[in-house]
Amino acid sequence: MKTRFVRSSAVALLCTAATASSFASSHREAPFITGQPKVDGTDLYMFRSYESGRSGFVTILADYQPFQDPQGGPNFFMFDPNALYEIHIDNNGDGVEDLTFQIKFKNTSKDAALPIGGKNVKIPLINSSTISGVNPATLNVRETFTVDLVRGKSRMGTRVAPAAGPLTNAAGGSATFDKPVDNIGDKVFGSTTGYKTYADQHIYGVNIPGCSTPGKVFVGQRKEPFYIAVGKIFDLINLNPLGAETGGNNNDLEGKNVSTLALELPIACLTAGSEPVIGAFTTASLRQGRLINGVPASGLGNSSKEGGAWAQVSRVGMPLVNEVIIGLGDKDKFNASRPVDDATFLDYVTNPVLPAVIESLFKPVNPAVVAPTNFPRTDLVNVFLKGIFGVNQNTTNPNAKPSEMLRLNTSTPVKASPQNPLGVAGGDLAGFPNGRRPGDDVVDLSLRVAMGALCTLTGASDTFKVGCKPSDAPAGGAPFTDGVRKTDVNYDVKFPYLTMPLTGNLNPPAAAGTTFP
């Protein structure tokens, strides 16, 4: 009896550690970042643009600031002006960035005031009236940003023209861009469609240093694109992992917004030589020093003084890595690390915890739920650290370095619609893990890969060269799922692809007769 109790307690502890921060992509995925939501990277998407006429471009979307309630006023969800947001591209497979797009923000208060009893008194809100156009007088805080291209290592690379330097507005040449304020509500923007008209004016055509073809930039709030039964996942995977793929559970992020950094860049300006595969990851960094002001001066961002070197605090490449692969004690370390140093975390990939957790939870009631037995898990090394042979693996660099990032074969033909949300596993080679599109079901795919799907797909002859065979993964062909599914029809068909953010006056009433404990 004592042995059974100890074993059961150990399994429960293992499950709790593995799921307490898992499966919400990279939302609140590590202890330190939970206290820094403005620099919490949530998801990275990268795919060949499938907007009509744009197949020669790659779209990269880096989402930050998770779990945004649409009603989150009065200060809403501005980016941190004391932070450095970066999108990195590795185009030769060595695990080191070759191009980095650095985004910095500036928030300026206009100190709008009203005459009250003979005195001009500053208003307490972000706007004084309705909003339309770029930077209207009624917007009390102007949020602007710059984008700098660095070639080579992001801290030591080339920063000057003509090969590097700031991206500039193709219409006028300015290097400063306006970010639209969040979707405060329909009255503020004039109608239910008013926010779209307003936000679309902040999609900029941009000139890119060292590149003859202009790209596009947008930064602003969007509806949260990631979908998952996150509440049930946190509750020790309290769902049927072999249940219905669609309609089985609610998408717990359906009522949330997110902040997006969106770039559309010419393929020819991202690749190097004859190699079509590129890797990407996004990071956010803060200054090492912070002095909190006891009595802040007036204005925005004066509650602290920041200084010292940049310290990286967030990192996102492939989805769900820090959540379901990296151990709890190393999550902050992973967020501060770079892909070139990922050998430090190799044991988490070759000997993963998640499959053992799933087997422990579900095998007693379903004998078919069996974890793979091939150790080291070379199949996972390929998915997360190298890319899949013949799909998105660098084959021209004999010294390509295993490193975790999102990889895209830019020569794969575009798939506009219908897209298969199971990506490569569903016969759609333009989908995950060959890059990632908004509609790709990375939760189901990550569950299946963890349980050995690649060992089954590669066959006895190991077509994908992942180093395992079907017999290594008895459950490798099982349709593991969280019961939530979206498709490409749930997203826009043109840049920046993610749909408009939910309005701040969205407040559905409770159902009649609802009672609360």
Image: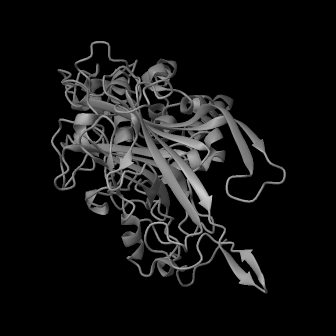
Residue 409 visible in the current orientation? no
Residue 296 occupies quadrant: bottom right
Question: Which of the two residues, 225 or 119, is positioned nearer the viewer here?
Answer: 119
- The reply, left or right, for residue 73 in relation to residue 378 is right
In the image, is 327 to the left or to the right of 351? right
Q: Is residue 467 above or below residue 124?
A: above
- Quarter of the image where the C terminus is located: bottom right
Q: How many marks?
A: 0
Q: Residue furthest bottom?
A: 117
| Farthest front residue in view | 172
Relative to 391, residue 19 above or below = below
Q: Is residue 332 left or right of residue 282?
A: right
In x, y percent, where is residue 266? 25, 41
Residue nearest the observer in this picture, 119 or 394: 119
Q: Quadrant of residue 456?
A: top left
Residue found at the very far right of the displayed protein: 294
In x, y percent, where is residue 106?
57, 52
x and y percentages locating residue 311 in the rendered image: 61, 32
* Residue at image point 27% right, 50% down: 421
Name which residue lies at 18% across and 38% down: 412
* Residue occupying the point 19% across, 27% down: 390
Residue 77 in the figure: left or right of residue 115:
left
> Which part of the image, by quadrant, shows the N terminus?
top right
Q: Position of residue 447 (x, y in %)?
A: 39, 40
Residue 120 sits above or below residue 92 on the image: below
Relative to the observer, which residue lies in front, 110 or 67? 110
Q: Would residue 145 be visible to someone looking at this image?
A: yes
